[in-house]
Image (cartoon, rainbow, N blue to C red):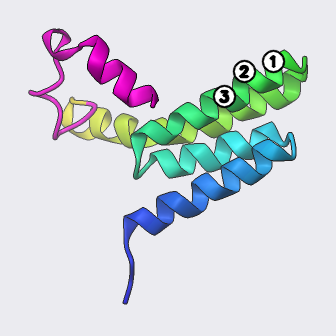
């Protein structure tokens, strides 16, 4: 059986974690960005790759991590271009009044 999007996301998160471990921050950002096309919170891993590259003062790696992580934003750009909304599902459900500390903390944990 074909397993679906969960394995796609898991595989690229695994690639990102392995690259992050080896301090290959550009590839870590790219893996996280690809995983984020199916699982948006995975883009946070790309953010950590950018921060780690900046912490190590590896400017080219930081730029590569930013570009790689930005791949995760491509679905939003596609929907914005074609439909005028960055997300068709959450267009009516994403409002400022729905933000809470509990949900924000849950996103990070």
Q: Quadrant of residue 99?
A: top left
Q: Which residues, given as a range, are shown in magenta?
A: 86-109
Q: Position of residue 19 (x, y in %)?
A: 78, 49
Label located before the other in sequence (3 or 1): 3
Q: Calculate the distance from the C-alpha at mark 3 to the C-alpha at mark 1.
A: 10 Å
Q: Position of residue 95 (x, y in %)?
A: 16, 16
Q: Quadrant of residue 106?
A: top left
Q: Quadrant of residue 77?
A: top left
Nearer-the-camera pick, 66 or 81: 66
Q: Is residue 46 left or right of residue 26?
A: left
- Secondary structure under tag 3 reads helix
Q: Which mark identifies residue 54?
A: 1
Quick one: quadrant of the N terminus?
bottom left
- The answer to if 91 sits in the magenta stretch is yes
Q: Which mark identifies residue 3?
A: none
* Residue annotated with mark 3: 48
- Looking at the image, residue 26 lies above or below residue 13: above
Q: Is residue 94 left or right of residue 92?
A: right
Residue extending farthest to the bottom is 1
- Looking at the image, residue 75 lies above or below residue 100: below
- Looking at the image, residue 21 lies above or below residue 66: below
Q: Calculate the distance from the C-alpha at mark 2 to the C-alpha at mark 1.
A: 5 Å
Q: Calculate the distance from the C-alpha at mark 2 to the C-alpha at mark 3.
A: 5 Å
Q: Which mark identifies residue 51?
A: 2
Residue extending farthest to the right is 57
Dot 1 surroundings within 10 Å: few (below 14), some, or many (20 or more)? Answer: some
Q: Position of residue 91 (x, y in %)?
A: 15, 29
Mark 2 near mark 3, Cβ–Cβ under 8 Å?
Answer: yes
Dot 3 surroundings within 10 Å: few (below 14), some, or many (20 or more)? Answer: some
Dot 2 surroundings within 10 Å: few (below 14), some, or many (20 or more)? Answer: some
Nearer-the-camera pick, 34 or 45: 45
């Amino acid at each position: 059986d074909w397993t679906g999007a969960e394995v796609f996301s898991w595989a690229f998160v695994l690639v990102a974690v392995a690259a992050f471990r080896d301090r290959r921050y550009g590839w870590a950002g790219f893996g996280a960005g690809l995983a984020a096309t199916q699982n948006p919170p995975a883009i946070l891993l790309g953010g950590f790759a950018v921060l780690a590259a900046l912490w190590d003062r590896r400017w080219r790696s930081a730029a590569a991590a930013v570009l790689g992580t930005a791949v995760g934003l491509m679905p939003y750009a596609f929907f914005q271009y074609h439909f005028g909304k960055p997300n068709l599902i959450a267009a009516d459900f994403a409002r400022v009044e729905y933000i809470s500390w509990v949900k924000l903390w849950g996103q990070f944990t």
